[in-house]
Amino acid sequence: RRSSIAPTAAPQNLRHKAVAAAALMAGAPKADRENGGSIKRDVSCWIAALRTHYLVLLIFTVIVYFPRLCLSYLVFFLAQSLRLIARIFGLETNRPVQNRRILVVTDYLPPQTHGIAIRCAAYVKHMRAQGHEVVVFSTASDTSRETSFDHPNIPAVVNPFNLNNCIGYNPGVKLAWFLGAHSWDVVHVFFPSLVGSFVLTTCSWRRIPVYCSHHVEMNMFAHEHVPFAPVVKFGMFTYNLIGKWPAIKWGTLNAAPTLVFARDHLGKEHEKNLRRVPSGTHDVFTPKMDNPNERQEVRSKRFGVQDDKTKVILMVQRLSGEKGTERIFPA
């Protein structure tokens, strides 16, 4: 992705040098030349970013999305037809086993370093350690730990708001085949996701339980990342149409980090199908201390706090503007 930007930036730098040289020959003041060069450089960077990310995302999600989606449904029903033929000829296609067959569909896995990716990787690791067959479809994976059960094959484009991540814009032929040809006890879809509607409709057709976990407060983050209200409204409507509303209609369970967020994001009227994602720290941290003076010692040595009235707040998160870290101080 870095190399895709470089060819665009280089010609712009050459043009910038040519403009600066022309200005110098024309006898323009130095300050004007510097200001003009700075503006041109900024404009060039914006054009490069727009051409290599925003437009690519728009083209793939709007123009390419529907033809590839139709192809995915075609592959799914082809796989279903072959399963039907196998059953007619008496071939076993859904033999009972002791372990669970779990399909995970996610845009978020290491080498991404945010919380959703780390949590998703931990889920997969521990479920496999318990002997379950966990097949993962994603937009990327840690190649040093990749197994034959990992398929980083979801068609994706670079996330224009986080260039280190990718957005899956279509399920792809391989995921469609796996959903149609294989047997699954449960499918777990990590949201936000643009492929959720396909997964949910096909699983509803086959009566496969789908667990949908929602990890991003889209209504807040959309306004933080995009300053234009009409664009935000169009984007949120599109996401609701192909993401959130299908999860509400066809998802067996919908979970979020807190029930308050789940109710706000998905609606209180769906309370019976809402769950809270269990915290991974409940079995690690305990209010019971081995040393009765541990609290006072830590507060004194680490934070320089000597009294019990002063509050010490510990926050573990990525430092980013949309996280709203500054809200903790007035609170």
Image (cartoon, rainbow, N blue to C red):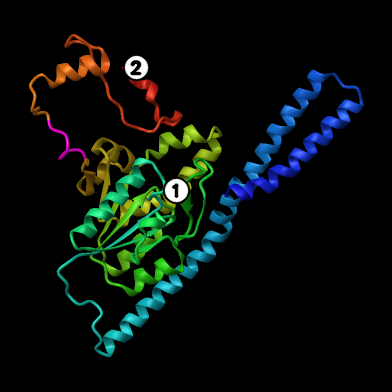
Residue name at image x 74 percent, y 32 percent: 40
Q: Are marks 2 and 1 in contact (CB under 8 Å)?
A: no
Give the CA distance from mark 2 to mark 1: 33 Å
Q: Amino acid at mark 1?
A: Tyr
Residue 178, quarter of picture: bottom left
Q: Position of residue 20 (x, y in %)?
A: 82, 30
Q: Nearer the viewer, residue 329 or 170?
A: 329
- Residue 239's label in the rendered image is 1
Q: Nearer the viewer, residue 24 or 90?
A: 24
Q: Nearer the viewer, mark 2 or mark 1?
A: 2
Residue name at image x 51 percent, y 40 percent: 161
Q: Position of residue 16 (x, y in %)?
A: 78, 35
Return the residue found at the far right.
26
As for residue 201 lying within the magenta part, the answer is: no
- In the rendered structure, the answer to whether residue 70 lies left or right of residue 91 reads right
- Residue 93's label in the rendered image is none
As for residue 285 lying within the magenta part, the answer is: yes
